[in-house]
Image: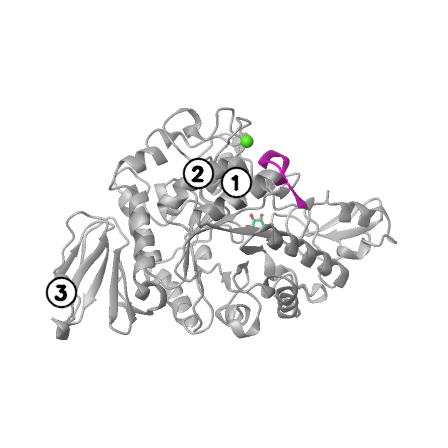
């Protein structure tokens, strides 16, 4: 396998709106990111992925772009962006930009043109259908609820929107439209962007007659052509596609270097394990064994071809410690470190979502008015119409809402967690008084320093990067343990996923050396290892024969 510069790096995902507000208008901005590069450097990340920063009316917080060549007013100017790119370069940090190519905003000039008349040269940049017997063309549903079709009075046809009705889908069948997108991507490459996260990218090829909205027949052709005309021309760029419909088979096609499509994808099998945001947001039961099986399947399948993206969440999912760990006072820190250890020991690139490194938790706003996310608000309206009780609706929202991950970054214990001097666009979590960056930086046993150490290990030891993966004790109901091996280098990752003690007996002739742990006095007697609540440890195994 050819080695790439990004193989041993970690990505930090920034949701700019909630990261840091430099000018007191309550909205995070590019200058705010610039002020925090030192912090990111200290953590040890070499790549940042910024959620969309282009001009947008913010129906979906920037995922509805009205001008791909301009910066969102609230975030700053093109000059600020150039300064940020330059500053990142000085810190040795590469920027991955979010490319939203499946749809634009309905306020994009193409769409305004397109709907002005059926004869517009931009009409075919979008997807239009006649009504059928006075009704929608078919029963396709939008991800954010309701029909995927919206009637345009002006021109008398329906347009398709996979997401909100202010996000009309672009028509990838149109080669002129594709060419426009290539030009735009090249514009950003010329500006110094080092990679792209391609939003909802497997939605670009559809087969509407067969009601296929995802991974349609031309998906690989489109990706290949885009690669050839844009990022593929630059060897050092890195790409990751958001592919909601990816199976391991598809993932290999997307990420096989020989095929020149993408470097990595985000697959969502783990994200769907508990039913969060799938179907009707209904909770699904699962066991640790199910979770181990999913992780192991992807580790194994993408061992030879492709590269895994390792993530516990992002701006679309609840906070990891609230979801997969235990955010109670007793176990928040231990379980956050345990989850980080499990993920960062694996093969692939780890993505850290802002605030994860300090153990930020989910939010519970009692008033629906305090929520901002279009998906959450649509869900609420739908459930009210269905006659659901308020308590029930709110319990769904607490578990599923994307706003869980979007409350302001908690920098210190001053008002609004030090995120803004003004009024934040979304309320902060009141636990900022105890959970914040300042506290973490002052406490050498904090979650932050645990992440820092994990990232350092990945830089220092190739076995973390290229070692093969093997699950051990697959049937253990409480412990996730696996081995990584690269020639003579071996590591063992052992994580207790629960708040109760357990024992695991590891049979080996090798001698364990402790690399990292979330307790101060972790045992090295591994043939009878007593694990305390959420205990997580990585050992380096040194061959008996060498001693
Ligand atoms: C992706 C983004 C999400 C957005 C959607 C539509 O899933 O991660 O935030 O709402 O695409 O662009
Ligand atoms: Ca601001």
Mark 2 and mark 1 lie on one chain; the one further toward the N terminus is 1
The front one of 144 and 19 is 19
Q: How is the image coloured?
A: one colour
Disc 1 designates what residue?
16
Q: Which residue is mark 2?
A: 36
Residue drawn 48% across the image and 34% down it: 20
The boundaries of the magenta stretch are 69-78
Q: Is residue 80 left or right of residue 484?
A: right
Query: Which residue is labeled 3 in the image?
Result: 527
Distance from disc 2 to disc 3, alpha carbons, whole Å, reads 44 Å
Q: Assess mark 2: CB under 8 A from ligand 2?
A: no
Describe residue 65's horizontal placement relative to residue 377 as left or right.
right
Q: Nearer the viewer, mark 2 or mark 3?
A: 2
Which tag is nearer the camera, tag 1 or tag 3? 1
Say which of marks 2 and 1 sits in front.
Answer: 2
Q: Residue at x 35, y 28 (%)?
A: 433
Residue 247 percent coordinates (x, y): 50, 67
Secondary element under disc 2, as helix, strand or loop, is: loop
Query: In the rendered image, which quarter is residue 215 located in?
Result: bottom right
């Amino acid at each position: 396998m050819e080695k790439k510069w990004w193989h041993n790096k970690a990505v930090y995902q920034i949701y700019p709106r909630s990261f840091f507000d430099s000018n007191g208008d309550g909205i995070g901005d590019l200058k705010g990111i610039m002020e925090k590069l030192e912090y990111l450097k200290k953590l040890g990340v070499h790549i940042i992925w910024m959620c969309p920063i282009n001009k947008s009316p913010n129906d979906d917080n920037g995922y509805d772009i009205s001008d791909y060549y301009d910066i969102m007013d609230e975030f700053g100017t093109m000059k600020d962006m150039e300064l940020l790119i330059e500053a990142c370069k000085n810190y040795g940090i590469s920027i991955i930009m979010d490319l939203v190519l499946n749809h634009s905003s309905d306020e994009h000039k193409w769409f305004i043109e397109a709907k002005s008349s059926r004869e517009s040269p931009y009409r075919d940049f979008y997807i239009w259908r006649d009504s059928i017997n006075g009704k929608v063309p078919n029963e396709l549903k939008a991800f954010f609820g309701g029909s995927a079709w919206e009637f345009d009075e002006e021109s008398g046809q329906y347009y398709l929107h996979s997401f909100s009705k202010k996000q009309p889908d672009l028509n990838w069948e149109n080669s002129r439209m594709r060419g426009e997108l290539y030009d735009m991507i090249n514009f950003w490459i010329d500006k110094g962007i080092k990679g792209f996260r391609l939003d909802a990218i497997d939605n670009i090829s559809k087969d509407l007659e067969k009601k296929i909205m995802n991974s349609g027949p031309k998906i690989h052709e489109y990706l290949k052509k885009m690669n050839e005309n844009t990022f593929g021309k630059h060897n050092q760029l890195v790409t990751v596609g958001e592919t909601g419909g990816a199976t391991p088979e598809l993932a290999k096609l997307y990420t096989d270097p020989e095929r020149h499509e993408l470097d990595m994808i985000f697959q969502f099998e783990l994200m769907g394990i508990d039913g969060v945001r799938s179907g009707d947001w209904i909770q699904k039961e699962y066991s640790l064994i199910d979770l181990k099986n999913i992780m192991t399947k992807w580790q194994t399948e993408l061992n030879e071809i492709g590269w895994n993206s390792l993530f516990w969440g992002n701006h679309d999912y609840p906070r990891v410690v609230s979801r997969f760990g235990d955010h109670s006072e007793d176990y928040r820190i231990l379980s956050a470190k345990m989850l980080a250890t499990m993920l960062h020991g694996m093969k692939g690139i780890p993505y850290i979502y802002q605030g994860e490194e300090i153990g930020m938790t989910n939010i519970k706003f009692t008033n629906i008015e305090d929520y901002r996310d279009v998906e959450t608000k649509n869900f609420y309206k739908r459930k009210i119409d269905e006659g659901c009780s308020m308590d029930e609706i709110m319990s769904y929202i607490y578990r599923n809402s994307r706003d869980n991950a979007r409350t302001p970054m908690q920098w210190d214990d001053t008002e609004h967690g030090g995120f803004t001097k003004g009024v934040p666009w979304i309320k902060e979590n009141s636990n900022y008084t105890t959970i914040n960056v300042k506290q973490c930086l002052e406490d050498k046993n904090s979650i932050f320093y645990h992440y820092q150490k994990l990232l350092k290990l990945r830089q220092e030891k190739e076995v973390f990067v290229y070692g093969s993966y093997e699950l051990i004790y697959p049937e253990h109901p409480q412990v996730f343990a696996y081995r990584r091996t690269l020639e003579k280098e071996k590591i063992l990752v052992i994580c207790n996923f629960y708040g109760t003690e357990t024992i695991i007996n590891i049979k080996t002739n090798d001698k364990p050396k402790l690399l990292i742990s979330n307790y101060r006095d972790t045992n090295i007697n591994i043939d009878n290892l007593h694990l305390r609540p959420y205990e997580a440890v990585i050992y380096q195994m040194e061959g008996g024969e060498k001693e």
